[in-house]
Amino acid sequence: MVKGKYVVVMAVLLLLSLPGYSQKGGVYKQKSSYSGFPSLVWPKLYATSFEKAKDELGEYDKPVFSDAVLALQGKVVTLPGYMMPFENGIKGNHFMLSSLPINACFFCGVGGPETVVEVFALKPMTYTEKPIEVKGTLMLNERNPDQMIYILENAEVLGEIGF
């Protein structure tokens, strides 16, 4: 019986010594230095729907932005995501940011155009497979078929997101 009490006391001392252990309620809570992930902006962007429209070039899917998305037009936002380079492959200041990993992104068939943002960064960024966080001015595009529906201008890459 003494052996069992010793094990319980040691377990309690171990839990109390762990960083992040809350003595209120006795629940272990992992401390995190990153407070922006998951994004509160991406779910708003996902709410965009599409309707068929026609112009001189033919029929296309026109984005219909929700009021929540329209409220973000011209505002500085911060988005986490996965980098997909276009220019030069490895390094550039013009790239796509996907809310989904590359194997599930818009270009691979799983996500829609509302899951990616076209980024124009102030400084070139070297490609990384790790998720990154980008901050910039969000612009909405409903007319130019050569660009994505969401564009992040004057963007700054804040860094990689560590887990």
Image (tube, rainbow, N blue to C red):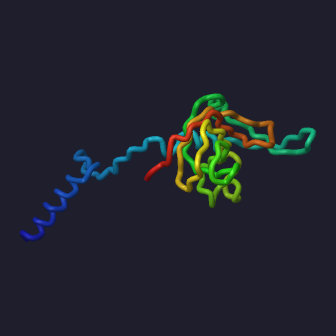
Residue sitting nearer the eye, 132 or 91: 91
Residue 125 in the image: state x and y as whole percent: 59, 45
Residue 23 in the image: state x and y as whole percent: 22, 47
Q: Going 69% across and 59% down the picture, which residue do you hit?
A: 108
Residue sitting nearer the eye, 84 or 44: 84
Q: Going 20% across and 53% down the picture, which residue do you hit?
A: 17
**In the picture provided, is 137 more to the left or to the right than 13?**
right
Residue 35: name its quadrant.
top left
**Does 5 sit above or below residue 29?**
below
User: What is the count of numbered marks?
Assistant: 0
Residue 2 in the image: state x and y as whole percent: 6, 69
Residue sitting nearer the eye, 158 or 50: 158
Q: Going 13% across and 60% down the picture, which residue do you hit?
A: 9
**In the picture provided, is 108 more to the left or to the right than 82?**
right
Residue 137: name its quadrant.
top right
Image quarter (top left, top right, bottom left or bottom right) of the N terminus: bottom left
Q: Going 42% across and 44% down the picture, which residue do you hit?
A: 34
Residue sitting nearer the eye, 100 or 69: 100
Residue furthest toward the left? 2
Residue 134 in the image: state x and y as whole percent: 56, 41
